[in-house]
Image (tube, rainbow, N blue to C red):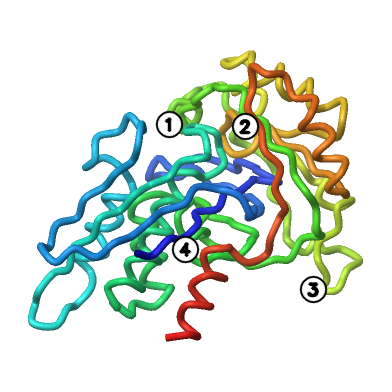
Amino acid sequence: MLKLPAPAKLNLILRILGRRPDGYHELQTLFQLLDYGDSLEFSARADGIISLDAGNLDVPERDNLVYRAAQLLRQEAQFADNISPGAHIRLIKKLPCGGGIGGGSSDAATTLLGLNYLWRCNLPINTLAELGRQLGADIPVFVRGRTAWAEGVGDKLTPVATEKRRYLVVAPGCEVSTAKIFRDSRLTRDSVAITLAALREGQLTETPISSEKLEAFSSNDCQALVESLYPEVRNAREWLQQFAPAHLTGTGGCIFAAFQSEQAADTALAELPRKWQGFVANGVQISPVHQQLAKLTSSD
């Protein structure tokens, strides 16, 4: 059995520049990977069947991104004697659905990476990222496994380093539909583009982007709309704001704040109202799933 993590992400910045002719939105965002998330267990099956145990997740198997990613990978790969392998996948959820922290996208990415290893497909990262893009715009960043500046629909990625910070993430229990937010006529769609150079101004390219720069540019064009539709998200942000500047991630509904010390984040978490859920995590530059697969590959 192969067990791998599926880390969460935060959008430290999210700017929507306009709607594209294909209906998607042109955006700019900074994906920050975390060392906390779901996990998946993969076991080979000799009968060629792909099966999924997603626990209490209320999504039909064939609609689950994990199942779809496994099927897509198997269609893409070439196998000896044209015998398609099978797998049983167990998904252990810790991340809330519709939270804007990439749970489903990360699960799908870990499935592509994990089965590529288990089935010995030997497909390159670029191919896996393209398969992920067919399933969702956020999946490629998890496949590539680097904290990154993103443009386009979120698929044009430039790896970046960010100053080490600890994050408190609050989930107020609102499952926000990304499609609903992007369809709403009230969504801000005319933000002025910024540049990665502006984020790095005064710093060397290899130097991590400072906390001061990140806070100066932090904004989320979805925040006002999400808070108007889901008042509990606004309540959570206002509560977290007493400890540190708080922001929406993605299209919601999770709120996050950055802390310089582990103790400060843990102290705030201890005060979290019982009606909400929360966790603390470190920002990382390289995905935990990539770190684990690198160890496995080196020992093969």
- Labels 3, 2: front one: 2
Q: Which mark is residue 43?
A: none
Front disc: 3 or 4? 4
Residue 130 visible within the image:
no
Q: Distance from label 3 to label 2 (Cα)?
A: 31 Å
Q: Residue 179: which disc? A: 1
Q: Position of residue 227 (x, y in %)?
A: 64, 20
Choose the circle earlier in sequence order: 4 or 1.
Answer: 4
Q: Nearer the viewer, mark 4 or mark 1?
A: 4
Q: Earlier in the sequence, mark 3 or mark 1?
A: 1
Residue 133, percent across and down? 39, 57
Q: Quadrant of the N terminus?
A: bottom left
In the image: residue 102, left or right of residue 263: left
Type of amino acid under label 1: Ala
Q: Which label sits on residue 254? A: 2
User: What element does badge 2 sit on?
Assistant: loop
Residue 189 located left or right of residue 243: left
CA distance for labels 4 and 1: 22 Å
